[in-house]
Image: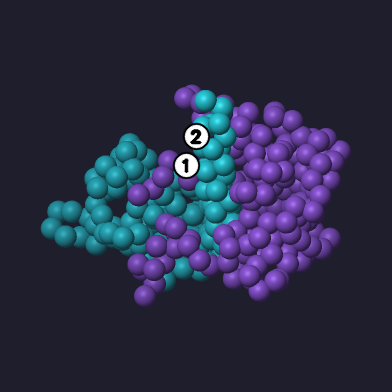
Amino acid sequence: MPSKNMTMVTAKPGKQELFITREFDAPRELVFKAHTDPKLYVQWLGPHGYEMILESFEPVSGGRYRYIHKDKDGNEYGFHGAFHEMSIDSMVQTFEFEGYPGHVSLDCMTLEELPGGRTKATIHSIFQSVADRDGMVQAGMEKGVREGYERLDEILETLVR
Amino acid sequence: MARTSTTHDPFNAVAEPKRRRILETLANDELTVTEIVDSLDWPQPMVSKHLGVLKKVGLVEERRAGRQRIYRVNAERLKPIFDWVTPFEHYWRESFNRLDDVLEELQKKEK
């Protein structure tokens, strides 16, 4: 059954931006902590089956980060950027996939307090061009990250036989 | 975003999260409008409006059975769209599902 905490990616055609939204059953202080405590961060970021290596992580305004997602065959996918602002009210960072160098996006994340101690996170990503955005959205395909798609995958399994 | 493009372009049509929810609801079943309304607990006019857009771009097909209209997903038209956006969404879905577990642990510790 659909969970109320659904991850939504909204990428309208012809635009340089996309939005990712997700709600959490936890107060925003904790969601923020999970984004700034390296011990917690490595526990959740990245696709299933990939080792998350946090090479550098300075979650303060002006800090830097670099992490690597490593698959079972040893293939490494590096990402890096800088934190422009890192506070509970506004997390703004640059983001660059090293497999697609020179194409940098700006990710702005906000955490909105919801009733019942819940939080809505919104990531607004702005790219340098429409092609950059589309390249990022499609990048997952090249990596062949295909297992366990949950519900959207079920659509295909049911229908595209 | 111009309305006209939404009603012609299937990519644009599924950029709206509510319409994706409808597609997901229709994934395993052919349903009437009433059944979709019951399943999602949204007002009927909202469901009908979004269904109309999905029908126009060919993502949803309608057939009549007696007095009822029954809707189903047009898989052929849908597949290229989900192939396009799903892997990226999947990345974040996987991550955030694990973040749920991390947050649950944190809350347990605080109590």
Residue A5's x, y, as percent? 47, 42
- Give the percent coordinates (x, y) of residue B111: 52, 25
Which of the two marks, 1 or 2, is nearer to us in this view? 2
Distance, label 1 to label 2, CA atoms, is 8 Å
Chain identifier of the cyan chain: B
Q: Amino acid at mark 2?
A: Asp
Q: Which mark is residue A5?
A: 1
Q: Is residue A130 visible?
A: no
Q: Are marks 1 and 2 in contact (CB under 8 Å)?
A: yes
Q: Secondary structure at mark 1?
A: loop
Q: Quadrant of residue A122?
A: top right
Q: Nearer the viewer, residue B14 or A53?
A: A53
Q: Amino acid at mark 1?
A: Asn
User: Element at badge 2?
Assistant: loop
Name the subunit of mark 2: A
Specify the quadrant of the image occupied by residue B31: bottom left
Residue A25's tag is 2
Side of A17 where A102 appears, left or right: right
Q: Is residue A63 above or below residue B60?
A: above
